[in-house]
Image (cartoon, helix red, strand yellow):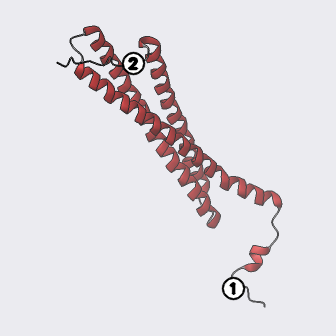
């Protein structure tokens, strides 16, 4: 009886091309999903940073307004809308993060399932389904931010640049 200590015969046994292609296809799906989620998180964070900078600018301008009730009301309205946008973007980032973690969990379940095939299908459905659900939720929250931004531009226009105050020197 020949010795095969590392299971070399099992590794070299011919596999049907369809089963190998299926394994590769299944293994790559979470990787592409994770790459897409990472790109979305970068987009959400960049947009969140820009909105946050805008909030600081509006707060600074609110502190400098000189009893102009129309301008103060407009800036306060704009500030409320920016806070709603931050909430939408925070939700998008949170859901995107959970979607990415679920995608990693699905990849881990695939790996563990290939080593030990027990109850893997239920975990894969739960984790990858959760990743898809969270990604859809993140995109929905991002869409809410986009609608808030469009609504603000349509209603109030772009926030005008502050007029520089020129102090007279003697």
**For residue 135, which quarter of the picture?**
top right
Image location (x, y in percent) of residue 46: 46, 37
Q: Is residue 101 left or right of residue 51?
A: right
The mark closer to the camera, 1 or 2, is: 2
Q: Is residue 164 left or right of residue 20?
A: left
**For residue 75, which quarter of the picture?**
top left
Task: Identify the secondary structure beneath mark 1.
Answer: loop
C-alpha distance separating marks 1 and 2? 73 Å
Viewer-nearest residue: 14 or 44: 44
Quadrant of the snapshot with the N terminus: bottom right
In the depicted structure, whether residue 48 falls above or below residue 128 = above
What crowding class fits label 1: few (fewer than 14 Cα within 10 Å), some (14-19), or many (20 or more)? few
What crowding class fits label 2: few (fewer than 14 Cα within 10 Å), some (14-19), or many (20 or more)? few
Image location (x, y in percent) of residue 62: 26, 20
Quadrant of the snapshot with the C terminus: top left
What is the number of the mark on residue 5? 1
Q: Are marks 1 and 2 in contact (CB under 8 Å)?
A: no
Q: Residue at x 28, y 22 (%)?
A: 61
What is the number of the mark on residue 145? none
What is the number of the mark on residue 159? 2
Viewer-nearest residue: 3 or 58: 58
Q: Residue at x 32, y 24 (%)?
A: 58
Task: Identify the secondary structure beneath mark 2.
Answer: loop
């Amino acid at each position: 009886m020949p010795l095969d200590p590392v299971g070399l015969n099992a590794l070299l046994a011919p596999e049907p091309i369809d089963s190998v292609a299926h394994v590769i296809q299944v293994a790559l799906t979470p990787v592409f999903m994770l790459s897409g989620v990472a790109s979305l998180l970068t987009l959400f964070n960049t947009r969140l940073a820009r909105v946050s900078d805008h909030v600081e600018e509006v707060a600074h301008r609110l502190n400098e307004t000189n009893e102009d009730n129309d301008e103060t009301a407009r800036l306060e309205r704009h500030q409320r809308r920016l806070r709603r946008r931050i909430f939408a973007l925070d939700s998008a980032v949170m859901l995107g993060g959970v979607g990415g973690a679920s995608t990693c969990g699905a990849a881990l379940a695939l790996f563990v399932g290939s080593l030990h095939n027990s109850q893997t299908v239920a975990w894969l459905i739960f984790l990858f389904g959760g990743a898809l659900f969270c990604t859809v939720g993140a995109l929905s929250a991002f869409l809410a931010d986009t609608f808030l931004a469009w609504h603000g531009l349509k209603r109030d226009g772009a926030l005008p640049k502050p007029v520089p105050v020129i102090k007279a020197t003697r």
